[in-house]
């Protein structure tokens, strides 16, 4: 079974602005994709697996921001950008900006 078949939510490519704030730092990260369940991103620093971070995603064209708490669920080296790390964030709680998330897959938990 491929990773795509195991995913609960469909991922959509995104170029929105994104910041990730962990206990010791806040960094601008490159958002790769977004889903109802979380984000895939490229970060200039490593966030350890299991770390809980605050997420801010902005869409300046629409004047909308998504604010959430998320957990780092995977990290790996980014072969295209050796000075960055690929990181997956699972949303724990979305507190603002649900309208930035892709519209509904059938299986919401």
Image (spheres, rainbow, N blue to C red):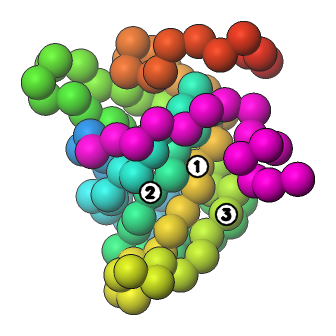
| Residue at left offset 45%, top offset 15% | 98
| 44 with respect to 85 (left or right) | left
Q: Contact, CB < 8 Å: mark 1 with mark 2? A: yes
Q: Nearer the viewer, residue 94 or 37?
A: 37
Residue 20 in percent (x, y) is at 40, 52
- Which is nearer the N-term, disc 3 or disc 1? 3
Predominant secondary structure in magenta? Answer: loop
Cα gap from disc 3 to disc 2, whole angstroms: 11 Å
- Using the image, tell me which numbered label, if any, was put on residue 20: none
Would you identify the image quadrant in which residue 29 lies?
Answer: bottom left
Residue 26, picture quadrant: bottom left
Between the C-alphas of marks 1 and 2, the distance is 8 Å
- How many residues crowd around disc 1 within 10 Å: few (fewer than 14), some, or many (20 or more)? many
Q: Which residues are magenta?
A: 1-15
Q: On the rendered image, what quadrant is the C terminus found in?
A: top right
Give the labeled residue for mark 2: 41
| 76 to the left or right of 96 | right
In the picture, measured across the screen, residue 73 lies left or right of residue 82, that is right
Query: Compared with residue 90, is residue 75 higher up or lower down, i.e. above or below?
Result: below
């Amino acid at each position: 079974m491929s990773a795509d078949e195991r995913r609960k939510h469909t991922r959509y490519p995104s170029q929105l602005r994104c910041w990730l704030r962990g206990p010791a730092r806040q960094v601008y990260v490159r958002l790769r994709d977004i889903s109802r369940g979380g984000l895939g991103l490229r970060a200039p620093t490593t966030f350890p697996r299991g770390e809980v971070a605050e997420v801010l995603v902005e869409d300046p064209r629409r004047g909308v921001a998504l604010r959430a708490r998320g957990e780092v669920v995977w990290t790996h080296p980014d072969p295209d950008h050796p000075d960055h790390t690929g990181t997956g964030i699972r949303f724990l709680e979305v507190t603002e900006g649900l309208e930035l998330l892709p519209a509904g897959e059938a299986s919401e938990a």
